[in-house]
């Protein structure tokens, strides 16, 4: 717990570093431009497609008429845009995570290593290509888990538990690998994953719940639909900051764990060599120097 709290406050302080603030601008600009561009060209067509699919279900029409009878007359106008935005949330989260992982994490890990672990050897236990495949594979598994868990979201408590857990697992997989890819060997990385899996997953889950903060924007309903061009970039900025903080948290924790692991391995290697040295010395033949004969004559 001490290591988690230590790395937590260090990550929070590093978020105020000018280099981290500058690095967070690039993913934000790219994501905001991408989302607004896609919305400009495909928003109307996507809403029409969603609205057409909804109208084909009699159950949806029955519920809409019932709610309109209760005074919710604008439900049909708002329902399709809200559903479309909710379907876009997982895409925004995943793309934001991958952008932070590719554009920010290497620079932030280098910053942490430069300021806190300058003597830590870089063993290059991975590569950019390996990191890419690892991230894409983990993302695919998270998307599958997310889709399979959607029916469980109808149970009220589970919608507050399952998505953050899935995002947390994905964050743990992507960020912890990228934090060690440059400094740890493959053996060291596997050992840290094994010994610190619970703590690393805990960091990911906390990050997943922090990433749920933009849900307050989605929950605003019709107001969010009207202000989507403004609130979507704000939500992307929040996601970027959360994932940047998570990346720094993983970097501080994993590099500290790596330094401790190497100290332990070096001490163990020294302990293993010492008995051998003593045994070698003990097995060395004893050479007795021949003394000249003692002359006792007066």
Image: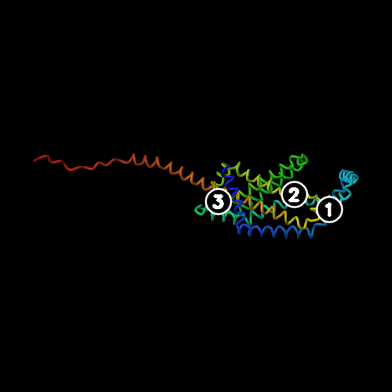
**Residue at image mark 1:** 49
Q: Nearer the viewer, residue 244 or 278?
A: 244
| Residue at horizontal 59 percent and vertical 45 percent from the top | 5
Question: Which of the two labelled residues, at mark 3 and mark 2, occupies the earlier sequence position?
Answer: 3
Q: Nearer the viewer, residue 92 or 156?
A: 156
Which marked residue is nearer to the observer: mark 3 or mark 2?
2
Whole-angstrom CA distance, mark 3 to mark 1, is: 47 Å
Mark 3 in CB contact with mark 1 (< 8 angstroms)? no
**Residue at image mark 3:** 125
- Where is residue 99? Give x, y as percent: 66, 55
Question: Which of the two labelled residues, at mark 3 and mark 1, occupies the earlier sequence position?
Answer: 1
Whole-angstrom CA distance, mark 3 to mark 2, is: 40 Å
**Residue at image mark 2:** 216
Which marked residue is nearer to the observer: mark 2 or mark 1?
2
| Residue at horizontal 55 percent and vertical 51 percent from the top | 125
Instruction: Count residues near mark 3 (Cα–Cα under 10 Å), then give few for <14, some for 14-19, many for 20+.
Output: some
Question: Which of the two labelled residues, at mark 2 and mark 1, occupies the earlier sequence position?
Answer: 1
């Amino acid at each position: 717990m001490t290591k988690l709290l230590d790395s937590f406050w260090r990550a929070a302080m590093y978020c105020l570093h000018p280099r981290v603030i500058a690095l967070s601008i690039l993913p934000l600009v790219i994501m905001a431009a991408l989302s607004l561009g896609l919305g400009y060209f495909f928003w109307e067509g996507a809403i029409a497609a969603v609205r057409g699919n909804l109208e084909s279900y009699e159950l949806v029409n029955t519920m809409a008429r019932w709610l309109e009878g209760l005074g919710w007359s604008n439900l049909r106008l708002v329902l399709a845009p809200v559903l479309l935005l909710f379907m876009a949330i997982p895409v925004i989260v995943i793309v934001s995570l991958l952008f932070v992982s590719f554009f920010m994490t290497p620079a932030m890990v280098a910053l942490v290593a430069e300021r806190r672990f300058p003597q830590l050897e870089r063993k290059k236990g991975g590569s950019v290509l390996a990191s890419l495949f690892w991230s894409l594979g983990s993302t695919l598994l998270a998307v599958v888990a997310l889709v399979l868990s959607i029916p469980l979201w109808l149970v009220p408590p589970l919608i507050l538990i399952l998505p953050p857990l899935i995002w947390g697992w994905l964050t743990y997989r992507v960020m912890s690998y990228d934090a060690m890819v440059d400094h740890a060997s493959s053996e060291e990385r596997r050992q840290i994953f094994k010994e610190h899996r619970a703590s690393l997953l805990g960091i990911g889950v906390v990050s997943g719940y922090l990433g749920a903060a933009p849900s307050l924007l989605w929950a605003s309903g019709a107001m969010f639909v009207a202000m989507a061009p403004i609130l979507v970039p704000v939500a992307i900025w929040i996601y970027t900051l959360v994932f940047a903080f998570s990346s720094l948290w993983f970097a501080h924790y994993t590099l500290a764990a790596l330094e401790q692991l190497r100290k332990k391995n070096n001490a163990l290697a020294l302990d293993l060599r010492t008995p051998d040295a003593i045994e070698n010395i003990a097995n060395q033949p004893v050479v007795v120097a021949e003394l000249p004969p003692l002359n006792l004559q007066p």
